Image (cartoon, rainbow, N blue to C red):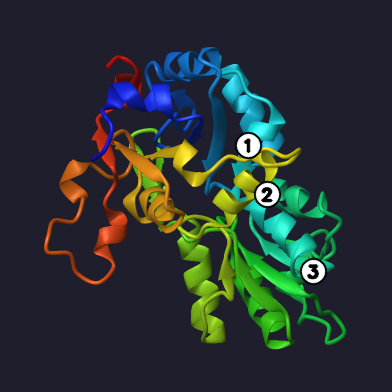
């Protein structure tokens, strides 16, 4: 039987929080999210921020939280961009890549020792020339790209057709920005997928569990023995946050300050994999969790 909300913050040691739609929306903090997080930290809980947003470096996320009066250090940030860069460098031996994404994502991937083509293949050159037949790379990485163009998509297609592996940071179709919903990384992926005739080989973000695996790998260094049952994931989106939690056998809380609400949770009898979209708990707002 699920614990009461009051018991959660007493018995759980690790709180994995989504950012967009859970802690803030765009440039605005969600009311009292800072106080809720401070309460967790004052209780000695481990707070990790796991976000599918790959547009920023981990340092940028950390700075944003600090500016919102939320204590944060770099070790607490796990973004889909960071996960992608670590996995490509350490697990897939990628040495060179072309990125459909922001300059900060390019920096994140380069920080793992991967050479990118983005600085040499600038937009002016892409529009003017055919891609030289000698240019290849190990991987093409798709993410949310605020300056996506036909030339970039054409280049990604050509590099994949020349043998580059096709990866994506995350597949979010949309994301919450202020009071609106905007297109996400799924738009970029769909454009390239339509051209090359196949989906990405791997999507590193939620709902896949690479981020959770990385979190526990780091937490359990130095002979620590944290278990999945010690953690709870809090997020606003069923098809990313909640699905990932269920994939990783972690309890979850859906908060209604972003994409989904209790009204969008699948009802029994479930169809296909709809049971993976059902959270352990639902609460209107992150602040309510710690006022129980």
Residue at position x 57%, y 28% in the image: 46
Q: Is residue 18 visible?
A: no
Question: Disc 1 marks which residue?
Answer: 77
Neighbour tally class for label 2: few under 14, some 14-19, many 20 plus, Cα within 10 Å: many
Neighbour tally class for label 3: few under 14, some 14-19, many 20 plus, Cα within 10 Å: many
Question: Disc 3 marks which residue?
Answer: 94
| Residue in front for this viewpoint, 7 or 238 | 7
Question: Disc 2 marks which residue?
Answer: 82
Q: Is residue 47 above or below residue 34?
A: below
| Residue in front for this viewpoint, 29 or 192 | 29
Determine whether, in the image, residue 116 is placed left or right of residue 229.
Answer: right
Determine whether, in the image, residue 129 is placed left or right of residue 238.
Answer: right
Q: Quadrant of residue 218?
A: top right
Percent position of residue 55, x then y: 61, 47
Percent position of residue 266, x then y: 19, 56
N-term mark: 2 or 1:
1
What's the CA distance linking mark 3 and mark 1?
A: 23 Å
Which element carries disc 2, helix, strand or loop?
helix
């Amino acid at each position: 039987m699920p614990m009461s909300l009051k018991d959660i913050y007493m018995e759980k040691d690790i709180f994995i929080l989504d950012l967009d739609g859970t802690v803030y929306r765009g440039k605005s903090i969600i009311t009292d999210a800072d106080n809720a997080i401070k309460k967790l930290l004052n209780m000695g809980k481990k707070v990790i921020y796991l976000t599918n947003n790959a547009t920023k470096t981990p340092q940028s996320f950390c700075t944003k939280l600090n500016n919102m009066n939320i204590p944060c250090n770099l070790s607490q940030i796990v973004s889909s961009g960071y996960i992608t860069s670590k996995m490509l460098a350490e697990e897939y031996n990628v040495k060179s890549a072309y990125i459909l994404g922001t300059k900060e994502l390019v920096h994140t991937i380069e920080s793992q020792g991967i050479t990118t083509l983005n600085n040499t293949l600038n937009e002016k050159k892409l529009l003017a020339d055919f891609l030289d037949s000698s240019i290849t790379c190990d991987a093409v990485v798709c993410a949310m790209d605020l300056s996506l163009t036909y030339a970039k998509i054409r280049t990604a297609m050509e590099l994949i057709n020349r043998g580059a592996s096709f990866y994506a940071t995350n597949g979010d179709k949309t994301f919450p920005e202020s009071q609106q919903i905007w297109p996400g990384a799924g738009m970029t992926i769909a454009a390239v997928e339509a051209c090359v005739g196949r989906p990405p080989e791997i999507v590193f973000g939620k709902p896949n569990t690479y981020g959770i695996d990385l979190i526990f790998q780091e937490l359990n260094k130095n002979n620590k023995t944290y278990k999945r049952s010690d953690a709870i994931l809090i997020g606003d989106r069923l098809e990313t946050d909640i699905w990932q939690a269920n994939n990783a056998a972690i309890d979850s809380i859906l908060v209604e300050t972003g994409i989904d609400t209790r009204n969008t949770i699948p009802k029994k009898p479930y169809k296909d994999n709809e049971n993976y979209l059902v959270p352990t708990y639902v609460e209107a707002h992150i602040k309510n969790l710690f006022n129980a």
